[in-house]
Amino acid sequence: MQRKKGKVQRLSVRMKKLRSEMVEISEEQQKIKEGQRQVREKFEAIEFECDQLRKETNLILKQSVSTQIRLAFMFQILKARENGEFDKAAQLTSSLREFIARENQQKKILAPADEHALRNK
């Protein structure tokens, strides 16, 4: 009877220890899950930021190209005037106006889409 009681006590102690370890493991798993969630949120935020930077970079690139084209037109207009080629200067000025008008039209078309994108952030 004594041996049986000792075995039961040892078994009881081992069970308590196992339960305690299971609680610790469960807590560690919860911490790991929370850490994974935080990492996922940070990664998503970084992805969003990268996407925004990509869009801004593309916009700056387009604006830069547009500015280069305008400057090229203006330079050609000045050269034509300098050389007394007023018909050519007038034609280039007209082309520059058309280019600017097309750009402004595109901006009007794209503006509602950009506004919609900003609202949905």
Image: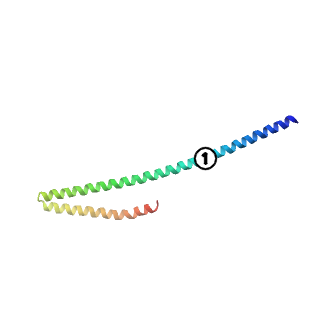
In which quarter of the view is residue 17 placed? top right
- Residue at left 59%, top 45%? 32
Q: Is residue 43 left or right of residue 8?
A: left
Q: Give the residue furthest to the top.
A: 3
- The vertical placement of 58 against 2, above or below, is below
Q: Is residue 118 left or right of residue 86?
A: right
Residue 88, horizontal then vertical, whole percent: 15, 60
- Residue at left 41%, top 63%? 115
Residue 119, horizontal then vertical, whole percent: 45, 63
In which quarter of the view is residue 104 placed? bottom left
Residue type at the position of mark 1: Lys
Residue at label 1? 31
Which one is in front, 59 or 26?
26
Residue 86, horizontal then vertical, whole percent: 13, 62
- Residue at left 75%, top 39%? 14
Secondary structure of the residue carrying numbered label 1: helix
- The vertical placement of 54 against 6, above or below, is below
Number of on-image labels = 1
Which one is in front, 37 or 92?
37
Residue 54, horizontal then vertical, whole percent: 39, 52
